[in-house]
Amino acid sequence: MPTLAELQSAMRAVSLGGDAAPLAGVIIGDGFSTQERLSIHRNNTTILLGESLGATFRIVKALVGDEFFANLTRQYIRTNPPTAPCLFEYGANFPEFLGHTPSLAELPYIEDVARLEWLWNESFHAPAAPVMTTADLGAIGADDLNALVLNPHPSLRLITSPYPLKQIWDLHQCDADPEALVNLDDGENHLVLVRSQLDVQIIELGAGGFTLASCLADGACLEDAFGAVEGIGDANEAPNALGLLIAAGAFQR
Amino acid sequence: MDQQAQTAHRLESPIPARAGIGLKAQHYQEILETQPDIGWLEVHSENYMCQGGPTHNWLMAMRERFPISMHGVGLSLGSAGPLDKNHLGRLRTLEQSLEPGAVSEHLSWSIADGVYLNDLIALPYTEESLDIFCDHVVQMQDTLKRRVLIENPSSYLRYEHSVIPEPEFLLAVAERTDCRILLDVNNVYVSAKNHGFDPIDYINQIPGELVKEIHMAGHSKTVIGGRTIRVDDHGSPICDAVWDLYNHTIALMGPKPTLIEWDSNIPELGVLLGEAAKADRVLDQHRHTDVTKPEPQHAHAR
């Protein structure tokens, strides 16, 4: 008879789609084949992890349909099973997996929608932190502003995509107009996500504003961040973006 | 071998001997707004191990209003390998911030070779698995510095090399580790139907004083190869046969904190409250019959 470690290793393999034959002398059949007995556990793993991914990637699920999504998650779960029990942390490389799935080649925006959903999920569960306000920034002397390095809020995330992600996102919120449509040729999206209050906000920026946000998130001082924006978008874009970011609580006090 | 946890256990659970319900995100707002008359709430520990955000805030708001029990589904105490220390640490952090009335886990395993299967799989009941399981319960109790409750599983298969009956195994765990028991009445029924044993006989083997919490849930039937297997999916009302078994259990053991679990096809809050009210009526019928302390028999007869 197998040791507990050997048994569990063999059952793990079956739950992830492997052959049940090695367990034939170990599991009592009592009217069922070994495969039938173990199918309940395989279904538990596949269905429950699939539901967890469906909660995290609900827009992807809506876009591809329940049945197709179940097929995708079955493949993903078998090749990328969770390594820890907190399932709100499961699925980090699901967007990349979707990007490499040949049957999704005709829906090239799906990977980016999944990336947005993953970043929203990360932002939603991030630690709380005190927020830097406009007043805090105003209290800093003009001489010190250029060298100022802002500390990103733990919930700050950035994403850029050639597809109109924000419009796709909005279409799948509960208050969306059921008649609304998204034109995939509407152009690229530059989005910042932050959850300084209760809800995750998604802020749409221009290319210049997004460059500023990226530089600041990477630890550039204000002078360098504004320098990096020169020549991108119009002159007001970067100052306006900084105002939006501060108001949204994108930086910690 | 004395594996008794050398820990300074806290006071006995403040979870009342009333019905409670499993807390679901769908019901957060309604529970806070309507403040229903429920005895307590139970949460799946793993869903609240985030460091911040709305989920965490909701839980802290609930904690101000209701006694909370933490029910873990991810520690995998029955795994042959070592416990995940990172996960145990996160459990400790949550337990410290929440100060729950009870902390529970399962007599089962869900992790092998570093993979979390998100399933609660019954163990083969052997001396090897008993040693491993008890070591892990002791480690959990030592880390949390409190006594934990261990829940009997639903099972869909048995192993050729299992030699210890499940109730005996569960009682051996309680004896060796000084843990207490979370008796899932629906699980007893599901396993009894799947394996053909008498659920009453199982319940009768568990001493009431060890049982600190009871779980009640709905299960489903699935047909495989023309035969029915019952699956503990927590997705429907509790069936009459499980209510009958619950009545038997409470008549035998006296009132116990009783959780209504509903984890899939989650209905409106009112449906859960209806099931909870039903459990409360059973508990109230036995409120004044203290069956846990039998009369001393003829102590001074001579």
Image (spheres, coloured by chain):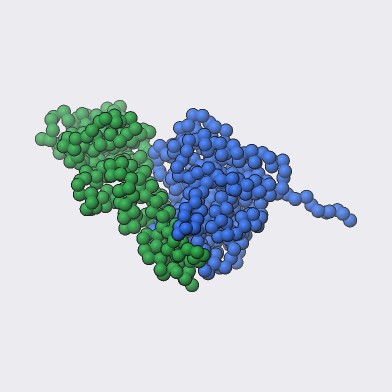
Q: Residue furthest right?
A: B302
Q: Residue furthest bottom?
A: A1
Residue occupying image coordinates x 51% and y 65%? A30
* Viewer-nearest residue: B85 or A62: A62
Task: Indicate the position of residue A50 as horizontal and vertical percent values.
Answer: 37, 49
Residue occupying image coordinates x 51% and y 29%? B34
Residue occupying image coordinates x 53% and y 69%? B161
Q: Quadrant of residue A143?
A: top left
Rendered hue of chain B is blue
Task: Indicate the position of residue B127 as horizontal and vertical percent values.
Answer: 56, 68
Q: Is residue B151 left or right of residue A149?
A: right
Q: Residue furthest left?
A: A231
Can residue A163 be seen from the camera position used here?
yes
Q: Is residue B52 left or right of residue A189?
A: right
Number of labels in the image equals: 0
Quadrant of image for the C terminus of chain B: bottom right
Q: Is residue B141 left or right of residue B175?
A: left
Q: Is residue A46 left or right of residue B36?
A: left
* Viewer-nearest residue: B23 or A50: A50
Task: Indicate the position of residue A238 as horizontal and vertical percent values.
Answer: 18, 32
Quadrant of image for the N terminus of chain B: bottom right
Q: Quadrant of residue A82?
A: bottom left
Q: Which chain is green?
A: A
Can residue B80 be seen from the camera position used here?
no
Task: Indicate the position of residue A214 as horizontal and vertical percent values.
Answer: 22, 40
Up-down relation of residue A239 to residue B286 (above or below): above
Residue occupying image coordinates x 54% and y 53%? B190
Up-down relation of residue A43 to residue A123 (above or below): below
